[in-house]
Image (cartoon, helix red, strand yellow):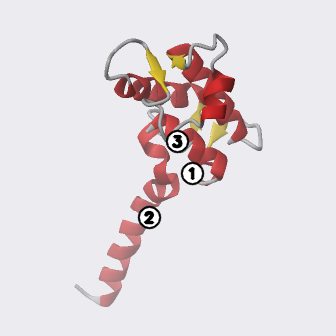
Amino acid sequence: MTFRASGVAVLATLLLATPVLAKGGVSAFDPDRDGTIDLKEAQAAASAKFDRLDPDKDGTLDARELKGRVSPAELKQADPDGDGSLDKTEYLKLVETRFMAADPDGDGTLDAKELKTPAGKSLLKLMK
């Protein structure tokens, strides 16, 4: 292979990989592959995460099951019925709150750059 041919092969490889690189961590939660996550996609991922975090299958997550994902103050704020746990509806409402905080431009989608912010990382804790 000549230098020119190998350079073309490298360039082609980079061009093909660019969409994957640009998406960063988005692709795991982006079933429509548009390079962004909308609220529906975030909630779908979070709903699956909720199910994985609920080993006793009681339909709620207590402070122990939420450890590292929700602070005690956030749990209290996200728990309107005050039972000390979050059901899936309460959990998904928290996801929505964190999603909105991670979407400073208000376009209704999150890209890889927005997910790398503190608010984006906080949201990801509820999704993965």
Q: Is residue 44 left or right of residue 79?
A: left
Does the CB distance between marks 1 and 3 fall below 8 Å?
no
User: Where 26 sits versus 13, above or below?
Assistant: above
The residue most toward the bottom is: 3
Q: Specify the quadrant that holds the C terminus.
A: top left
The residues bearing labels 1 and 2 have C-alpha atoms spaced at a distance of 19 Å
Q: Residue at x 64, y 51 (%)?
A: 118
Q: Quadrant of residue 99?
A: top right
* Mark closest to the chain's N terminus, 1 or 2: 2
The residues bearing labels 1 and 3 have C-alpha atoms spaced at a distance of 11 Å
**Nearer mark to the viewer, of 2 and 3:** 3
Residue toward you, 5 or 17 = 17
Tell me where residue 34 appears, x and y as whole percent: 53, 40
Tell me where residue 20 appears, x and y as whole percent: 43, 54
Asked if residue 46 can be seen in this view, the reply is yes
Q: Which mark is residue 15?
A: 2
Does the CB distance between marks 2 and 3 fall below 8 Å?
no
Q: Secondary structure at mark 1?
A: helix
Q: Specify the quadrant that holds the N terminus.
A: bottom left
How many residues crowd around disc 2 within 10 Å: few (fewer than 14), some, or many (20 or more)? few
In the picture of the structure, the residue carrying the numbered disc 1 is: 112
In the picture of the structure, the residue carrying the numbered disc 3 is: 124
User: Where 25 sits versus 86, above or below?
Assistant: below
Q: Amino acid at mark 2?
A: Leu
Asked if residue 108 can be seen in this view, the reply is no
Q: Residue at x 52, y 29 (%)?
A: 41
User: Where 3 sits versus 67, above or below?
Assistant: below
The residue most toward the right is: 105
Tell me where residue 69 appears, x and y as whole percent: 52, 38
Tell me where residue 33 appears, x and y as whole percent: 47, 39
**Nearer mark to the viewer, of 1 and 2:** 1
